[in-house]
Image (cartoon, grey):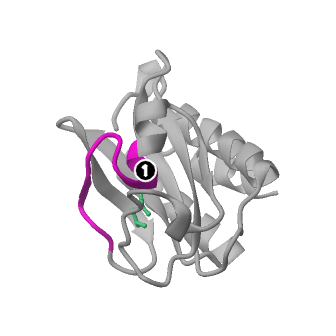
Amino acid sequence: MLAKQVDSLLAGESNPTGQLANAAALLHEAMGWWWTGFYLVKDGELQLGPFQGPIACYRIKQGRGVCGTAWQENRTVIVPDVEQFPGHIACSSMSRSEIVVPLRNDKGEVVGVLDIDSKELATFDEEDGRWLEEIVHIIERHTVTPQNCKL
Ligand code: SME
């Protein structure tokens, strides 16, 4: 249901900042997560993009934290307990588990990540990963396709 809502929410709009902000708002409100947002690759690092939730760190280097790992390894990373993840970047001490899904361009390169944090342990499983990847593909289609590469 959320995937369909994201699709119709982003369709026909050409402002990627607004689209990512609305996508974060929709997911965050619907699911009641602690932090939901995007980091975008810019100048060789991940920089804070549109999000919902408490304030967050501005920049993350490749390979650092969960976001930097998802970028470096070009894969979804699920962390059931952030305290067990070496190098986790604690933007908020309330965050206990998280999932990070890469956004890719048409060449398969990572152009950003969707980062979701929860106040509960082990909030995200493989099925969440599959659905969030589906949602990220929809977001990519509306924002980072070759004809519409604005991120
Ligand atoms: N949890 C992230 C850092 C970003 S904030 O949580 C919003 C990480 O370790 O990559």
The number of numbered badges drawn on the structure is 1
In what quadrant does ligand 1 lie?
Answer: bottom left
The quadrant the C terminus occupies is top left
Q: Is residue 138 left or right of residue 42?
A: right
Identify residue type, mark 1: Cys
Mark 1 within 8 Å of ligand 1, using the beta carbon:
yes
Residue at the top extreme of this rendering: 107
State the image coordinates of residue 146 (x, y, percent, origin top left). 44, 19
Height in image: 87 above or below 145?
below
Residue range in magenta is 56-68
Residue at 61 percent of width and 75 percent of height: 33
User: Taking 6 as reference, is 36 above or below it?
Assistant: below
Q: Quadrant of residue 116?
A: bottom right
Along the viewing direction, whichever of 40 and 10 lies nearer the viewer: 40
- Camera-nearest residue between 72 and 148: 72
* Residue at screen point 72% across, 56% down: 5
The reply to whether the magenta stretch includes residue 67 is yes
Residue 113 placement, left or right of 96: left
Is residue 4 at all visible to an observer of this figure?
A: no
Vertical arrangement, residue 147 with respect to residue 84, above or below: above
Residue 53 appearing in the image: yes
Q: Residue at 57% across / 48% down in the picture?
A: 10
Residue farthest bottom in this picture: 94
Please identify the quarter of the rendering in which residue 86 is found: bottom left
Identify the residue position indicated by label 1 in the image: 67
The answer to whether residue 30 is above or below residue 84 is below
Classify the position of the N terminus by image quarter: bottom right
Residue 98 position in % (x across, y down):
58, 63
Residue 116 within the segment the image draws in magenta = no
Circle 1: is it few (<14), some (14-19), or many (20+) Cα within 10 Å? many
Image x and y of residue 12, in percent: 54, 42
